[in-house]
Image (cartoon, rainbow, N blue to C red):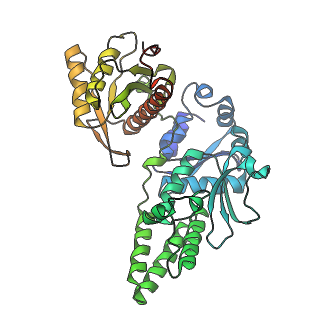
């Protein structure tokens, strides 16, 4: 197979699950937010370096590719796990030891718990349930981070107890914000078991059946004039039909045409504790791939206090003193118009022409909008996520080792 073969397949730019096959045998199953981008990414140059020699070997052995579309990336995550369990493709097992895959367990209790555990803990009996049996075991899930985000989304729709919340001193708070069931209700046990039943249907990949069941419950509640219940179920149906997938964006590389071989993006972010221990970072993404060896750290010298734009100006000014670092084709700021303007001003004053975009966030610090013109939205978001993660980690390390030190701080930027 080659790029010409892939282009002829006309793979859609939607979420779903893809299959690498040899004859009728499935060699590998994967999920994607964009089937088109994900499959084409396997045919980049230096595949064995980008992914692994094992996956490169799998691609070489395959003679066909198939796929199955899903309405959302979350449903692709669930479908991938169910299909891996069903077909047990040889390269899924080889790529990552099955024992380290994640499983979702649901206990058999009056108020069942939903637990996230690793396969090797199950095999080694390290999951302590004090004699409580398991009602359901879903998995294996290869993508632990995506699974955790999925559980966060699902918990807002169907509140459930996890491994810690039932012991938490803040259980009343979690109940108020809808992450725990309200056990004080008259029919609390029955309502909670319906939530678990709905969760089971979702993990079984029976989303259409789930919605039909909810619609039936909603109409029955309305008929009995239980309007609060009917409204609650209506919200659940709406949430399932409008699942947000921002937090489930693939952390894989993205395909680009040959003419775009060197599309480099630099993203900047600032981190501090109420204006103290201010640090900044630069993250680099090229052709959809993070380049960690080219990331840079900056300890802000001109103490700006709670003034991210001032710190940002210092970072960019210092970055521009290093022409040996290849200039990017796009710069990404974490923030809004003020941050975007600050970087553009530094660039103008330095006589450098590079377009700038800014990623604005909502109250939960999730990407909401990109200010500026770009056709590389996925790469912009990836670069922004990398810069934010890198900044937070750097700030934590600095704060823990040098919070009370005024001297002897090692200079880490270049």
Q: Is residue 199 above or below residue 45?
A: below
Relative image position of residue 326 (x, y in whole percent): 39, 15
Q: Is residue 206 above or below residue 29?
A: below
Q: Residue furthest right?
A: 124
Relative image position of residue 185 (x, y in whole percent): 49, 78
Relative image position of residue 353 (x, y in whole percent): 25, 19
> Is 304 positioned to the left or the right of 47 in the image?
left
Relative image position of residue 228 (x, y in whole percent): 39, 79
Which image quarter is the N terminus in? Answer: top right
Quarter of the rendering containing residue 192: bottom right
Q: Which residue corresponds to the image point at 57% horizontal and 63% vertical from the top-left?
A: 161
Which is nearer the eye, 31 or 323? 323
Q: Which residue corresponds to the image point at 70% horizontal and 41% vertical from the top-left?
A: 91
Q: Is residue 273 above or below residue 311?
A: below
Say whether residue 383 is visible: yes
Q: Which residue corresponds to the image point at 42% horizontal and 55% vertical from the top-left?
A: 244
> Is 226 positioned to the left or the right of 305 in the image?
right
Quarter of the rendering containing residue 271: top left
């Amino acid at each position: 197979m080659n790029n010409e073969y892939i282009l002829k397949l006309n793979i859609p730019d939607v979420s779903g699950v893809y299959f690498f096959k040899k004859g009728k045998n499935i060699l590998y199953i994967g999920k994607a937010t964009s089937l088109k981008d994900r499959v084409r990414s396997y045919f980049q140059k230096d595949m064995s370096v980008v992914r692994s020699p094992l996956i490169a070997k799998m691609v070489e052995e395959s003679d066909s590719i198939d796929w199955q579309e899903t309405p959302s990336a979350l449903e692709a995550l669930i479908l991938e796990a169910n299909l891996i369990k069903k077909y047990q493709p040889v390269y899924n097992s080889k790529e990552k030891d099955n024992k380290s895959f994640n499983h979702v367990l649901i206990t058999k209790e009056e108020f069942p718990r939903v637990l996230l555990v690793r396969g090797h803990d199950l095999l080694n009996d390290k999951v302590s349930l004090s004699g409580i049996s398991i009602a359901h075991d879903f998995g294996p899930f290869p993508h632990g981070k995506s699974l955790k985000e999925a559980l966060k989304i699902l918990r807002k729709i169907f509140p459930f107890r996890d491994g810690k919340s039932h012991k938490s001193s803040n259980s009343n708070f979690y109940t108020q914000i809808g992450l725990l069931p309200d056990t004080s209700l008259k029919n609390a046990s029955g309502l909670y078991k319906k939530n678990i039943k709905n969760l089971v249907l979702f993990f079984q990949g029976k989303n259409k059946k789930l919605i039909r069941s909810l619609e039936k419950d909603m109409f029955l509640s309305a008929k009995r004039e239980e309007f609060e219940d009917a409204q609650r179920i209506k919200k659940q149906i709406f949430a399932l039909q409008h699942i947000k997938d921002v937090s489930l964006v693939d952390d894989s590389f993205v395909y680009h045409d040959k003419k775009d071989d060197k599309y480099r993006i630099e993203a900047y972010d600032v981190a501090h504790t109420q204006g103290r221990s201010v640090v900044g970072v630069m993250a680099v993404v090229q052709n959809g791939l993070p380049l960690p060896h080219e990331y840079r750290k900056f300890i802000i010298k001109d103490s700006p206090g709670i003034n991210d734009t001032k710190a940002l100006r210092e970072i960019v000014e210092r970055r521009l003193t290093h022409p040996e670092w290849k200039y990017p084709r796009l710069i990404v700021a974490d923030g809004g118009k003020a941050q975007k303007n600050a970087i553009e001003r530094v660039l103008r004053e330095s006589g450098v022409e590079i377009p700038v975009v800014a990623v604005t966030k909502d109250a939960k610090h999730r990407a909401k909008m990109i200010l500026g013109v770009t056709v590389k939205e996925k790469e912009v978001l990836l670069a922004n996520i990398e810069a934010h993660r890198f900044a937070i980690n750097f700030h934590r390390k600095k704060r823990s080792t040098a919070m009370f030190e005024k001297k002897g701080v090692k200079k880490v930027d270049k």
